[in-house]
Amino acid sequence: MDRSFLSHAGVVAASREFVCIRPSTYESAKEAPFLESLFRGRSDNLENTVFAILAPDGRTRLCRTGRSPGFAYSSPDDMARAMQQILRKYPGTAPANTTLPLLPDVRLAINVAACDSTPLAILYAPDPATRPALEQKLIGLAWHKNLVGRLQYCVATKPGELKSLVATGVRPGLLVVQPGAYGTGGQVVTSRLPGASSEDLQEALQLGILLSEFQQKVMRTHVARGRQLGINWTTAIPVTDPGGRRRP
Amino acid sequence: MINRLLPALLLLYSVSPVHAADAPGRIAWFGTLKQGLAVAEATKRPILLISAAPHCNGVSGIW
């Protein structure tokens, strides 16, 4: 991903008024055709990254689509200005911060959290009846000015989904996890029961952020060490990026 | 509990390499098309989309 654009203060500020979607490439057969419809690389296949700005209908393109923001904008400042112009045309009719932004499953969520160097908040609800109230509290916290964008979120409903976590006596509720460097597992750093107050949940999320530490990652050394450790991520669908195929 | 842990946390904070707490403002992403497109349609807000593969040549933990 192109962090120089997506970490720019003006882009981040404008993003608060957009709906920001980051599907994980090659992790969903259902999502792949949509991504391919937006951009295919020189190989005429889905590549590792796809970038677009779209109208609320999800179809109308509002910029040149490509592999990264650099396909559409000359600089992060240029992108931030363009986003502000788009917001004047599409100001929205309701806030987008009334939904908990979720990753599809625990396995992928731990990996995405590792990629982002953020903690992961797991809403663990084996009893479906406990989910709505806890989720409602987490929605407010996920978009809180001190927490927005600083954690990933997902839902687990079965103990088996938590098998890659280091934890003792996991109970339903909120689990805050520090992912391992390779995103294949993580450690529960704090947890709360389903009936916890919003203030208690906020304390847990902030504690998770405070306790989580990450090594700076350099692509070359991360990959080389990962190979030594036998890390081999299995994607949901075949990788078709000519430069990003998995090892045989 | 926080008050009791605070000295230890501050010590940890001072000696560790990179903390999530140090990260600048970040974009909050919906992780699936289904959820994100539904929110955009319901709120009539424009969409910032980037997909990325959470691995490099099969090694996870890095975009």
Image (cartoon, grey):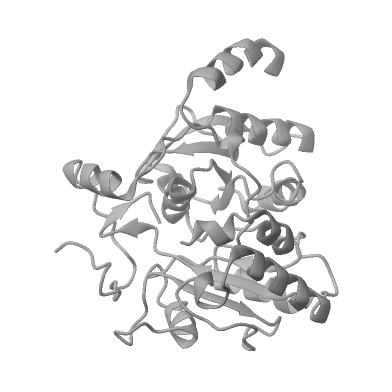
Q: Could one spot residue A37 in this view of the protein?
A: yes
Q: Give the residue displayed 32% in from the left and 64% down from the top.
A: A235
Name the image quarter holding residue A59: bottom right
The location of residue A31, given as percent across then percent down, is 47, 77
Q: Residue furthest left?
A: A248
Left/right placement of residue A220 relative to residue A60 reads left
Q: Give the residue displayed 65% in from the left and 15% down from the top.
A: B6
The location of residue A149, given as percent across then percent down, is 64, 50
Quarter of the picture holding the N terminus of chain B: top right
Name the image quarter holding residue A191: top right
Q: Is residue A159 above or below residue A238?
A: above
Q: Could one spot residue A172 in this view of the protein?
A: no
Q: Nearer the viewer, residue A194 or A240?
A: A240
Q: Is residue B52 above or below residue A67?
A: above
The location of residue A75, given as percent across then percent down, is 58, 67
Q: Give the residue displayed 83% in from the left and 75% down from the top.
A: A91
Q: Is residue A145 above or below residue A48?
A: above
Q: Give the residue displayed 51% in from the left and 71% down from the top.
A: A70
Q: Nearer the viewer, residue A132 or B16?
A: B16
The location of residue A27, given as percent across then percent down, is 40, 67
Q: Nearer the viewer, residue A25 or A87?
A: A87
Left/right placement of residue A221 relative to residue A155 reads left
Q: Nearer the viewer, residue A11 or B55?
A: A11
Q: Residue furthest right?
A: A93
Quarter of the picture holding the C terminus of chain B: bottom left
